[in-house]
Image (cartoon, rainbow, N blue to C red):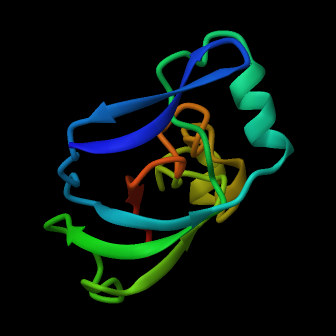
Amino acid sequence: MYKALQVSETGQLALVKKKIPTPSSDQVLIQVEACGICGADLSDISGENQFMRVPGHEVIGRIIALGENVPLIWTMGQRVGVGRLGGHCNACDQCRQGAFVHCTNQTYIGSNQDGGYAEFMLAKTTA
């Protein structure tokens, strides 16, 4: 189990315990060392329908577990940073044109994917 700050109601965070997740084939598990706060985080916390989500997307931490298909550039113990974009799909029109930031299947860390206001978090790897 690990501790996280999770949106409990509009504009409110609650300290909760969650089960440590296992990375999927293209993810890493990060032990969070620090996480910044920005306007997007405040929007996620005060937004409607964000309940039960862990905000935070300016994350620094170390990789402590690797999914089975993670590229070799990512290693155990490596210090990494995680931003707002949660990883592109490589399949939509925008990705096929190389415009990954415009991916139509993009997740957003702290908004529709748990973020770094926690002791651990998952992050997708892309090569």
Return the residue nearer the eye: 16 or 39: 16
Say if 29 sits above or below 46 in the image. below
Please state if 27 lies on the left or on the right of 46 as rendered: left
Please state if 7 lies on the left or on the right of 32 as rendered: right
Identify the residue at horizontal 54%, vertical 31% (top origin): 112
Say if 118 sits above or below 52 in the image. below
The quadrant in which the N terminus is found is top left
Residue 66 locus on image (x, y percent):
21, 70
Residue 127 locus on image (x, y percent):
43, 76
> What is the total number of numbered labels drawn onto the structure image?
0
Say if 127 sits above or below 99 in the image. below
**From this viewpoint, which residue is outermost toward the left?**
68
Identify the residue at horizontal 59%, vertical 39% (top origin): 55
Residue 64 locus on image (x, y percent):
25, 72
Residue 86 locus on image (x, y percent):
54, 51
Return the residue nearer the eye: 91 or 55: 55
Instruction: Residue 45: name its quadrant.
Output: top right
Please state if 84 lies on the left or on the right of 24 as rendered: right
Return the residue nearer the eye: 55 or 72: 55
Identify the residue at horizontal 19%, vertical 64% (top origin): 67
**From this viewpoint, which residue is outermost toward the front?**
15
Identify the residue at horizontal 52%, vertical 52% (top origin): 116
